[in-house]
Amino acid sequence: MHDLLINGGLVVDGTGVPGRIADVAIADGKVVGIGRHRGERAQRRIDADGLVVAPGIVDAHTHYDPQVTWDGLCDTSSLHGVTTVAAGNCGFGVAPCHGDDHEYLGQLFARVEGMDLAALDQIAWGFETFPEFLATREGRLGLNFGMYIGHSAIRRWVMGDASFEREAKEDEVAAMVQLVDEAMGAGALGFSSSLAPTHLDLADRPIPSRLASTDEVRALADAVGRYGRGSIAFAPESAVEGISPDDRDLLIELARRGGVPAITQGLGGRSKVDAPTKTWDESRQFLDRSAEQGTPVYSLLMTRALNGPFTVAEGTSRYEGVPAWHRLMTAPIEEKRRLLADPDERERLRFAIDHPNLDPTKGTTLPPPFWESLRLSDTSVAADQHWLGRTMVDIAAERRVHPADALLDIAVADDLRAVFHWSNETPAWRALLKDVQRHPQMIVGVSDGGAHLDRDDGQEWSTHFLATWWRTERVWRLEEAIRLMTAIPAAILGLSDRGILAAGRPADVFLFDPERIDVGTCRLQEDPVLGVPRFRGVPVGINATIVNGTVVVEEGHRLEARPGQVVRPS
């Protein structure tokens, strides 16, 4: 008898071949047959007539390692068909971490990844080392979970406070190499690091990995190379503004030293903010060169625009790269009112927004939101409500003021409670994305799942990709779109048993209605586990997410089964 029979759906298996109407039989967590199984016995049946039956989605870039200690399902991803996630990215990780260093780790995640400090207090410890962390996840996961060993984590373990103050000494590098070796032996996805100048902690100190020398990074890549499996995830110093020629060469070198794919981010002009634009031709040549040399570099590509609301009263982290605006956004409410009533301060704010910080030695270089993509979302002031939905560029032009004054005047009129909505989407961004996503070394999607509670972190990227780039824009055939989200990232990560529906493989399955699938709602809601506010996307048209043969999400509702496994590259 089968545990589960999925009858009559269009099976799109992840290989890229056209789908076929078939039944999927599942037993003991694995697919045991795809074909004609309708008359066979099963403990449960799902009628998939009119539905697509696809492999579970693989998300190559998340920060779920804190969250899985209190919420093994991570439903902001599993609601959208994701069955396997890669965590420990950007050099961050909950392990290794000394038992007396939890506070430092919490504030690092809170600043760089926008997590809630109160939520981070809920991390269920009981581990210190990387192998101990993986061992404690078994039996507690709702989805499949893989983990990189993070550069900042091992630097902090070895060097303490010196990790964000100086380069490592020879013996310290040797100790870090030993930690990478230990993690790889335990099944790490590989090694991750970030030198990005946007990455600072709550005390405005650089994250530990930013103090590493190139030789230190090389030594850690060599440690991965002794195993030759998994991948190296590396965000170089130039990642925010478009990767420099030297950093391109370094990425190829790291891929060669590790004998594994290198995964980066930031190809194109400011692509962590507005996606590849002005430097895409150069980036394409670089990717092609890396593949020709047998040392392929892949780039994460967010095909879903970043976006989120904010008020001046509550503040936002999106202006960290403009110190004068960041001080405004983080000041007490009475100080905000005083500053905005001061004409000299207004002049300083206008100048500052036109001259954001571009020097990483002076702090984060995170670009501020673009005026042409920043809109008024809500206001209680009747005289300003005709501006709702309009961009700051449009409002400023009609009012004949600087866009900064357009925003700040509307905010002041509503006692700083007016809601603005920022996004990185522009017509040029959308047009070029149609071409960029077609490059075979672009990893579409990626969610940053578990991070950035103050905004939509892209958690619904998979449903958006299908609804937008497959169904609406027709950039892809359905079989190609599914392959890009399943078999391709699984292969890059070295997860040879995930991403394809086939007999003998784990039964990770995603069922959806091809006519209805869409992002649904994505708004601030109370987290179902911790009760803290966070953006949470609830899609439409997704019938079920199945992990290792067990339904974990059904018709938009999370279930409490824990069939997930720790996944390791092979």
Image (cartoon, rainbow, N blue to C red):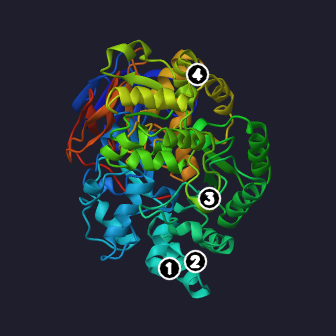
Tags 1 and 4 touching, CB below 8 Å: no
Q: Which residue is mark 2?
A: 166
Q: Which residue is mark 1?
A: 162
Q: In the rendered structure, which amino acid carries the disc numbered 1?
A: Ala
Q: Which of the two marks, 3 or 4, is nearer to us in this view? A: 3
Q: Quadrant of the N terminus?
A: top left
Is residue 451 shown to the viewer in this render? no
Q: Residue at x 26, y 67 (%)?
A: 125
Say the numbered circle drawn on residue 47: none
Q: Which residue is mark 4?
A: 477
> Helix, strand, or loop for circle 2?
loop
What's the distance in space between the residues labelled 1 and 3, CA to CA? 19 Å
Query: Does label 1 or label 3 sit earlier along the sequence?
Result: 1
Query: Does label 3 or label 4 sit earlier along the sequence?
Result: 3
Tags 1 and 2 touching, CB below 8 Å: yes
Q: In the rendered structure, which amino acid carries the disc numbered 3?
A: Pro
Is residue 365 shown to the viewer in this render? yes
Q: Which of the two marks, 2 or 4, is nearer to us in this view? A: 2
Query: Does label 2 or label 3 sit earlier along the sequence?
Result: 2
Mark 1 surroundings within 10 Å by alpha-carbon count, few (fewer than 14), some (14 through 19), many (20 or more): some
Q: In the rendered structure, which amino acid carries the disc numbered 4?
A: Arg
What's the distance in space between the residues labelled 1 and 2, CA to CA? 6 Å
In this orientation, which residue lies closer to the viewer: 328 or 347? 347
What's the distance in space between the residues labelled 1 and 4, CA to CA? 52 Å
